[in-house]
Image (cartoon, rainbow, N blue to C red):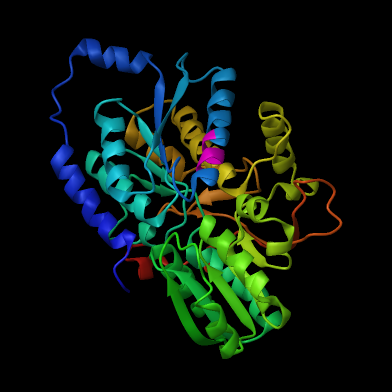
Amino acid sequence: MSKSPVNTGRRSAIVAGAATAATVSVPSLFSIAKAQSGPIKIGFPVPLTGPFSAEAQDQVRAAELAIKEFNDTGGFNGRKAELLVRDDKLNPGEAATRTLELIEKDKADYIVGSLSAATQLSINAVTKERKVIFNSISQSDAINEVKDWSMYTFHEALNPHMTAGAVARYAFPKFGKKIVYLTADYAYGHEMVRGFQRAGKEFGAQTLEDIRHPLGAPDYSAFLPRIQALKPDILVLCNFGRDLVNSAKQVTDFGLKKNIKVITPVLLYTSRLAGGPEAFEGIVGGTSYYWGIESTVPAAKAFNDKFRAAYGGSVPSDYGALGYAGVRSVLTAVRNAKSTETNAVINAMRALKYNFYKGDQYYRRCDHQSVQSVIVIESKSKNMKDKYDVFNVVSIENPDEKRLRSCDELGHKA
């Protein structure tokens, strides 16, 4: 792998943690009593500025909904919850600094958040050093691996192995075996390609080329003739946010869709709205959540209705839903544990069986990965009921630990 934001991000987190760590004094009995009677604080570092800002803002909206639900139903022992939102600017060093401030200065009890493989690893480095629970709501394979993981680490989001695998198992048998990847050159892109390639072995899939582009690239025109000349059956856009929007538009304008099926591991609701129906027409991808499953999943209908009521009739996005579930699972564990003490909440989260918005979920014991369904969707431009009706659900892969990398492979003892 070439140097990427994720590699520098881990080093930045360690350096930032060492450079800015505050001296912790022994608390007085008064301060302990005050903390136990004050609000339950959840730090929420996400990239409010930068190429993933639309997704991050929806994470905040849905997380605030989880906070409101908790408070409206009595909180815990009279204590209400409070969301402390911070902008990590999609920068690993900034994410580490903001997380340290949340823990040391703002006295956050728990951390939920992130929207990048790079930032979540730097946040995790800080939280595990400080022995604070972190529930990540962004995709990463590395965060589950023993070298980065700790008992304080939970992963509410899907991971690339799960997501890419589900899309590959749907798309490769239907659309062909010759594959070209257009890949954002950082951990997210690399891990997604690996997930596709591993799943593709079952179908004899052949990688013609993995073409890499920098994060935040505005122009893909130099790559498109090369892709066309390779004559793949499938082009996989292994990128995210604005990169996905820009590449989908340019692939469509160049005419690649005429002879090539375009797929993506994560087909973002916010990207589809930003890019429009023509750019995304026919593109297949995976998602942790699509509001349209409400017709068959009662928990989705209940969640969507609460979101609509709070936000002027709009519907939650995929990453917004992760913000909701990431916060709600921590607060549910507090109630189940009848305590805010870290070890008690960890044990309650490990025992949690929940259905907050999409169907049954639970955290795998060895690595705290949320075992859940993967939804495969296809973008549409016709027969839309309203402006929110942008995808058809073409397949749902049910929760199954067999679809995850094994505990042994990740370095955990089962």
Quarter of the image that includes the N terminus: bottom left
Q: Residue at x 47, y 71 (%)?
A: 183
Residue 401 in magenta? no
Q: Is residue 152 above or below residue 287?
A: above
State how many labels appear: 0
Q: Quadrant of residue 106?
A: top left
Is 13 left or right of 407, judged from the image as shown?
A: left
Q: Name the residue nearer the viewer: 78 or 388.
A: 388
Q: x%, y% of residue 337?
A: 44, 31
Is 34 left or right of 334, judged from the image as shown?
A: left
Residues drawn in magenta:
56-60
Q: Residue at x 32, y 59 (%)?
A: 5
The answer to whether any part of residue 165 appears in the image is: yes
The answer to whether any part of residue 204 appears in the image is: no
- Majority secondary structure of magenta residues: helix
Q: Residue at x 26, y 59 (%)?
A: 8
Q: x%, y% of residue 57?
A: 53, 38
